[in-house]
Image: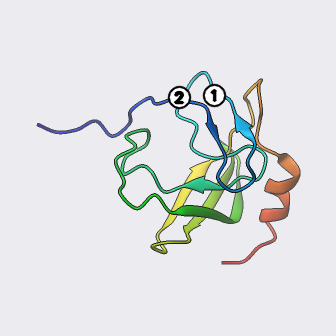
Amino acid sequence: MESKRFSKNDEGFICVHCGKAVVPMGKSSRDHCPFCLWSRHVDINPGDRANPCQGDMEPISAVPDTRKGYIIIYRCKKCGQEHRNRAALDIADQPDDIEKLIELTTHQF
């Protein structure tokens, strides 16, 4: 049986990097902190929470995207895997910090 490529798993969490409380997005699976933009290496497919790594994902860069706003590029501090994720700018509660996103666009990886 084939597993789905996306599982909605919209839960709040406490950010392991900055310690702030993050509320659910309300429409998708939130996978990074809107305050510091750090994430956890928890998914194999979006929302499945099936990745055994569980490492901290550092935001290393961001790329402007005309269709999606910004794409954040992460690197896992534990295993080194890189991952791309769309920024959450259109969220009423706790949108991603636009200043941090803009700052990340100047980072080279």
95 to 41, vertically: above or below: above
What whole-number distance in Å separates the C-alpha atoms at marks 2 and 1?
6 Å
Residue identified by numbered label 2: 10
57 or 85, which is in the foreground?
Answer: 57
In the rendering, which numbered label is found on residue 25? 1
Q: Is residue 48 left or right of residue 89?
A: left
Q: Is residue 15 left or right of residue 77?
A: right
22 to 58, vertically: above or below: above
In percent of width and height, residue 90 lies at 74, 30
Q: Earlier in the sequence, mark 2 or mark 1?
A: 2
Outermost left residue:
1
Disc 2 marks which amino acid? Answer: Asp
Is disc 2 placed on a helix, strand or loop? loop
Disc 1 marks which amino acid? Answer: Met
In percent of width and height, residue 72 lies at 65, 56
The quadrant where residue 56 appears:
bottom right
25 to 85, vertically: above or below: above
105 to 96, vertically: above or below: below
Quadrant, the C terminus = bottom right
In percent of width and height, residue 83 lies at 51, 61
The quadrant where residue 73 appears:
bottom right
27 or 67, which is in the foreground?
Answer: 27
State the residue at coordinates (55%, 57%). Answer: 84
Q: Is residue 106 left or right of residue 6?
A: right
In the rendering, which numbered label is found on residue 81? none
Outermost right residue:
99
Quadrant, the N terminus = top left
- Label 2–label 1 contact, CB within 8 A: yes
Colour theme:
rainbow
In percent of width and height, residue 75 lies at 56, 68
